[in-house]
Image (cartoon, rainbow, N blue to C red):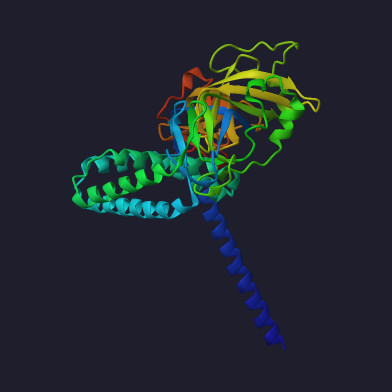
Amino acid sequence: MLRNRIRAFLTATFIIVILAGTILTVGKIFSEVRSRPVLAFVSNGEIEEVIKLSGYIVRSETLLTAPQAGYVQPAVPEGTRLAYGQEAALMLPERGTAQIEQYNDLRRQIDQRRLDLLDQQSAGEALRRYDQADIKLQEPIAALQRQAMRGQLRGLEAPQAAIELVLDQREADLEKIDFGDEILAELNHSADVLRRQIRAQSAGVLATIPGIASFHSDGNEAEINFAGINELSPADLIRVLEKEPEFFNLADRTVEREEPVCRIIDSAQQYFVFVLSPSYTELASFPGEPTPTPIPGEDDKSAPLCLGVRLRLFLPAQLQHINDALIMRLERLPDQRILLVCRTLHGMESLLNCRTVEADLVLRRKSGLMVPLSSILRDDKDSDVGEVMAVRGGSLVLVPVKIELSNENSAIIVCTDDENEIVSGNVVVTNPENVKEGEPLR
């Protein structure tokens, strides 16, 4: 029994020694890894401070209705700019739907023949048109993928509409190209004859105002009077903002007389209506209240919102910058939120089938030396002063800096040590808390 106890004691001691050695070895390895500096270059860059907003789009819109019951056939591609009196759609009688199916079958054969010719590299101009369309499709497809991956299904109409617009324009461009192919020429001839037959028994729907044609509607075209948006009560505006609009297709369906078949959007201007949180009150200068005095220039510490100021907006879903958003209305609501209405002359086509818009409001922009935010040592994460661990002659040196502007990843800095200046191309440590000043770079 004594021998068994001694054996058990020796075994336990051996295991403890092995575990202690393993722990020391692992600890040393982790210590080495932690103390190994991770390096990054200092570069020239730009950072923007933004507010993320969700708003409502108000446009001058007119619904064109069917002059007779029948099948709605678009006469122009989605997004086409129409003149007053130009034909937007055709109303086909019920018996014309079979001809439409035959016509669409011819169009599919034409598309397939074009692709065959492209595979044979026998149509250089057509290839150029396809390449141009592919380039234009990259951004809306990327936006569609990003939103789908994030589960942002509400805003998918915008990139989808942009894709349809590019494809329709490509189709219109290809119609003008002579491929020099007899089979394609015969198909085009047959389609043209059938199209004329269809048109002969159809009633045209004419644009009553000049603008952009869309064959989608959400039924909210009359919710806000475009001409009177600046006089509409805040309560009415908020009521509309709380709706969840959804666009539906007006074309390629059978409708009754006076039902909508097309939407014409006045392409001159549109309004964005936003409601900001009370936390942004300090940025706003309301009519009749004392006006804060901003620091003039591009890099203002704060850019007060006030009537007549042009805002910089970025629309992430459309990958589009709008720099002319003129503030037309600014009010403090009873619950202390801020009603902001701005007007823009841009973004009409990309927002054609959107009633809401997601926008980043750029408050200020700063350019200069940019470093990873993790490279700055600070006593307080909200402080605008700190130190970076820079590489100097193979050693690590702490350099005091001031943070001009930062986001979640990077910071624009200014060196406050004239004798140890940081310039673009220098190297800094992105894990400075794990190394010490004066250590040699390993």
- Residue 190 higher or lower than 11, as above or below: above
Kindly indicate the quadrant of the structure image that contains residue 127.
top left
- Residue 31 higher or lower than 206, as above or below: below
**Quadrant of the image containing the N terminus:** bottom right
Residue most toward the front? Answer: 201
Residue in front for this viewpoint, 124 or 437: 124
- Residue 439 higher or lower than 370, as above or below: below
Report whether residue 402 is seen.
Answer: no
Residue in front for this viewpoint, 347 or 37: 347
Q: Describe residue 176's horizontal placement relative to residue 319 as left or right.
A: left
Q: Describe residue 121's horizontal placement relative to residue 137 as left or right.
A: left
Residue in front for this viewpoint, 325 or 224: 224
Report whether residue 256 is seen.
Answer: yes
- Residue 310 higher or lower than 383, as above or below: above
Residue most toward the right? Answer: 334
Which x, y percent locates residue 442?
43, 43
Q: Describe residue 240's horizontal placement relative to residue 99 as left or right.
A: right
Which x, y percent locates residue 286?
72, 16
Which x, y percent locates residue 197?
36, 46
Which x, y percent locates residue 94?
49, 52
Residue most toward the bottom? Answer: 1
Residue in front for this viewpoint, 265 or 386: 265
Instruction: Give the mark count.
Output: 0
Kindly indicate the quadrant of the structure image that contains residue 10.
bottom right
